[in-house]
Every structure is written in C-alpha cells, then in structure tokens.
Image (cartoon, helix red, strand yellow):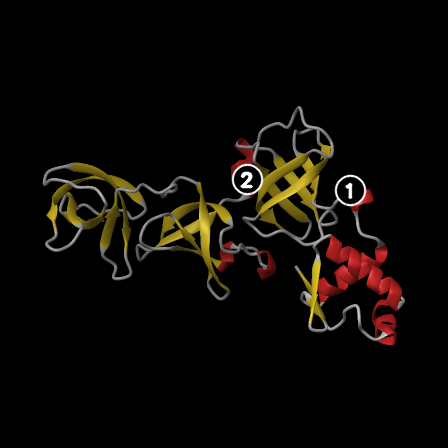
Amino acid sequence: MEKLNVGTIYAMHVLGQLENDDKYVVQKGRTEALLQTEKSYNPGDLVDVFVYKNEQKKFMATDQIPPVIVGTYGWVDVVDVIPHLGAFISIGVGEDILVFKEDLPALKSVWPEREDKLFVTLKADSKDRLLAIPAKESYFQDMFQFANDVDLNEQVTGRVIRVDREGAVIYTDDGYRGFIHNTEREKEPRLGQDVTGRIIEVKEDGSLNISLLPMKHERLDDDAEKILAYLIEVGGEMDFWDKSDAEAIKRTFHMSKSAFKRALGRLMKHGKITQQDGKTKLN
C-alpha cells in the first residue's frame, strides 16, 4: 500500500460521493481519503488535492490548495495563542496547525497575536500530525532586495521576522531588510506584527536601520516619557490620574501636580492613554 505523506499535494482519483454528504472518496494506490470540496466530481476524475489527517487520524483531502505545504514557505494567519503550547495558524483547511512554543521567542510578550502573520513551512511528526515551523532570518537572505532610491526619514512598512534582545528585524513591503534597534522603539514589536517606521540609515549592504520613534520635534517631553515608562513598567494601568493627590504624584514621579497634568494632557493628545474612574491606562 502506498503511504500518503500529509502536508503534500497528490493527484488522486475520485471513487464516488458519500450518500447524504458533500464529501467524496478519493484514492491513490490503495490508500483512500475523504475529499471536502464545494465542487462536483464524477467517478474516475483525477483531482489535485492537499492531504492531511483530522483529529480522528483519518486521511482528509481538500482541493483548496493552501499557501504553504511541506517543503515550501508562505505567509499564514495566526488564529489563536495558547501560552503553554504555542500559536495556532490557519492554512485554509479543516484543521489549525500548531507552532510549538519552542519555535517561538523565549519572551512571551513578543509572541504573535491573532491576525498577525508568520512565514512558515510545514512538517509532519512521527504520528502524521502537521506542525508549522517559522522561517529563520537566514531563509530570507536570498529574498532581501538591495535598498536603493530611498530617503532618510522615509516611511516604511514591514512584518517582523525576528525578535531578540538587541532588536527586531522586519521584511519590508518592498523586500528590504530593516533592523529596529531596541533603543528605537517604545515597545518591542511582536513576531509577525506589521509595523511602520522611518528610515534612519541606509547601510552599505543595502539593508535599512529603522526607528519606530517619532522625530525629535514630534516627541513627548521628559515628564510625559517618564509617565509612559511607568505605565509600561506596571503593566499598562496605574492608580493615578489628573485628580490624584499632589504629594503622591511627587513621591512617585518627582514632579509637581501641574507638570503631571500637563504631561497627561500631551499623552492623551497623542492617543497614548485614556483616563477613567481614577485610573490611567495605555491605549
């Protein structure tokens, strides 16, 4: 009996349609699979299908060829994140596919979230379960374009493909490599997140250094930055607002109440915070 490899495309013959069901039985050699489709087929038709196994470990097939199969890479949507397991991605078939936590950054705060996109390939484990493996930056080396005809402070958008203590690397919409040093962002971006920044250096190798910070004349003053840093440190919510006690403000932020209120106003104007019920929260 010919063994079917999950995550692979095969040309399979249609044997027939199940009664009272929209599924077809398809066959390659002596191995059968259930084909889920919105199309109509006749017995004997030859159809290209993607093969996988469902939760009951039965072979399934779909004629909706996904953007990534075993041996190829593609961008896929993150559909769920479970901290003790990893992230689940969708390739458009009946089953979501796991990216093990060991293949994600060590710091959970930079894990992808729902609707982020990862560049992955598929592999099958010893039990024929499909797993997704994110591409390492080295895979992109032949994909990166040499950046030319770009200007300093020009806006650039890309997707994060690597995150570590030094900073983050993005693959820009134009195919350039962009590096965001950890001093050039307020918060470390997530793996798979779309970010927009500005070019601060074009390097000799054709890659870009990018900042996610506004230009100096657009930045917040020191008091606002101090409040923003405190909010980030305490998890995004603090028991201070513009009506808080002046002495408590002085002890915590080392500024007067009037300076504190001015800084809160600037943060709200920039859309960084909201105030409600005696608390201030990051947006």
Report x, y in % for residue 262: 84, 60
**Circle 2 SS class:** helix
Q: Earlier in the sequence, mark 1 or mark 2?
A: 2
Q: Is 151 on the left-hand or right-hand side of 31?
A: right
Report x, y in % for residue 277: 69, 73
Task: Answer above or below: position of 155 versus 280.
Answer: above
Say which amino acid is labelled 2: Ser
Residue of label 2: 138
Q: Residue at x 59, y 56 (%)?
A: 110
Q: Residue at x 67, y 67 (%)?
A: 235
Q: Is 53 on the left-hand or right-hand side of 13?
A: right
> Which one is in front, 75 or 247?
247
Tell me which corner region of the image, top left, top right, bottom left or bottom right, holds residue 65: top left
Report x, y in % for residue 73: 43, 40
Q: Quadrant of the C terminus?
A: bottom right
Numbered circles on residues, count: 2
Question: For the residues marked 1 and 2, what is the alpha-carbon distance in whole angstroms?
Answer: 31 Å
Say which amino acid is labelled 1: Met
Tell me which corner region of the image, top left, top right, bottom left or bottom right, holds residue 234: bottom right
Mark 2 surroundings: few (<14), some (14-19) or many (≥20) residues within 10 A: few
Residue of label 1: 215
Q: Is 233 on the left-hand or right-hand side of 65?
A: right
Report x, y in % for residue 8: 30, 43
Task: Answer above or below: position of 6 versus 85.
Answer: above
Q: Residue at x 88, y 75 (%)?
A: 247
